[in-house]
Image (tube, rainbow, N blue to C red):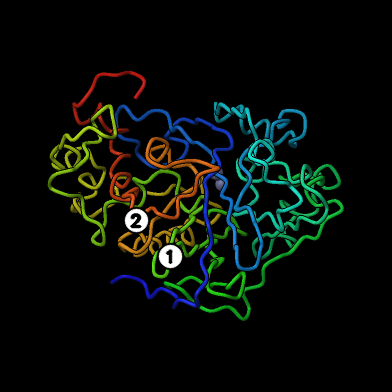
Amino acid sequence: MAPLLPYDMGTIVEVSVIHAGRTTVPTAYVVDRPIAGHNVLDMPCYSFLIENRRLNKKVLFDLGIRKNWKEKLPPSILHQIQSAKALVDIEQDVADQLRNANVPLESINAIIWSHHHMDHTGDPSLFPPSTDLIVGPGFNRNKRTFPGYPTNADALVTDDAFSGRSLVVLDFWNAMTIGGFLAIDFFQDGSLYLLKSTGHTHNHISALARTSKDRFIFLGGDIAHHPGEYRPTKHLPLPTEIRPSPLGEEISSPSVCPGSIFEAVSSANIRGLDAKVTPFYQLNAAMNEDLKDAEIALEKLLRFDGSSKVMVIISHDASLLDVLPFFPRSINEWDVKGYKAEGTWRFLRDFARAAGGTTDESV
Ligand SMILES: [Zn+2]
Ligand SMILES: [Zn+2]
């Protein structure tokens, strides 16, 4: 059953995706039992500019990677990056891209962090003191997140993010519920909801942005790291014929390919489950502070992903790189333009080698 979506109060937000850096890690670091040939997880880092034109307010959901990460990040994170054999790449950060598009940094009312990981926190110190920093519940009561480094040697975030600006810690005490998630109506006009989705980290939040009267974009943060962790399901089964074929080089290619070739490579088979309606991958304990909570949050997400009224975008979905238009363009017309239809099964190209579709070593 589709989740009960919040009723329309007449206001939408304009959403654009800012590509703010890229990391790659071995797939085994992120999911249980990577599919043969899917050895490296390509993780672009998305930041989202969300604009409420009625209130003349702009917020950013996540900031991607900061340019001076090597100099500024705590040694424990640099060590983690090294031991994970992660590559980190950032050319133009969010502040650069906003300036280039003539969006003054002073016009950004708040930065919302989905959680405290370095591929999401960017560099808030580039923004003026009038830009608030909004974080999930418990952020200021956990020594991994507050106070920041170097004041607090255990912190995984830096002091410079907070200094001179308001830190707003969300409190879901009086929250409503949307699709099983505790939710805060951020602008109090039904245009943007912040959802408590802890599990990946203790402070993880997601967002639900209304892009038209009855259409939404679900910003999932790191609720998952690859679409194979939440597709297919009984809410969104693997089609018999996949169109456009994820094996096609060009997204515009009209080719079709049978779903069965991918069913055969799913880890669901090993678990004795129906590969048509079971996600290809499972979350792992290493990637999630509380695996049980992360699984509960993901389970709730599945129903949003299965709804034709919602497009789910997680922070690191590389399959959307050649489907979505990026900032300064908006993705509000995702439904009319068919981005969800084109993008849903695009991730299957990561399994092309296992499915026998290509011998390209770079896939
Ligand atoms: Zn994370
Ligand atoms: Zn991340």
Q: Is mark 1 within 8 Å of ligand 2?
A: no
User: Residue at position x 13%, y 41% from top?
Assistant: 260
Question: Do the residues under discs 1 and 2 have CB atoms within 8 angstroms?
Answer: yes
Where is the C terminus found, in terms of image quarters?
Answer: top left
On the rendered structure, is 6 left or right of 113? left
Q: Under tag 2, what secondary structure?
A: helix
On the rendered structure, is 270 left or right of 170? left
User: Residue at position x 54%, y 38% from top?
Assistant: 19
Q: Is residue 205 above or below residue 337?
A: below
The amino acid type found where label 1 is placed reads: Ser
Q: Nearer the viewer, residue 210 or 225?
A: 210
Q: Nearer the viewer, residue 146 or 350?
A: 350
The residue to which callout 1 is attached is 212
Where is the N terminus found, in terms of image quarters?
Answer: bottom left
* Rendering coords of residue 205 (x, y %): 57, 60
* Rendering coords of residue 237 (x, y %): 21, 55
Question: Around disc 1, counting alpha carbons within 10 Å, would you say few (fewer than 14), some (14 to 19), or many (20 or more)?
Answer: many
The image quadrant of residue 18 is top right
Q: Under tag 1, what secondary structure?
A: strand
Q: CA distance from mark 1 to mark 2?
A: 10 Å
* Rendering coords of residue 156 (x, y %): 71, 45
Ligand 2 shows up in the quarter that is top right
Q: Which mark is residue 335?
A: 2
User: Residue at position x 76%, y 55% from top?
Assistant: 131
The amino acid type found where label 2 is placed reads: Asp
Q: Nearer the viewer, residue 3 or 36?
A: 3
On the rendered structure, is 223 left or right of 141? left
Q: Is residue 193 above or below residue 88?
A: below
Which of the marked residues, 1 or 2, is nearer the chain's N terminus?
1
User: Residue at position x 63%, y 39% from top?
Assistant: 101
Q: Is residue 308 above or below residue 159?
A: below
* Rendering coords of residue 345 (x, y %): 28, 44
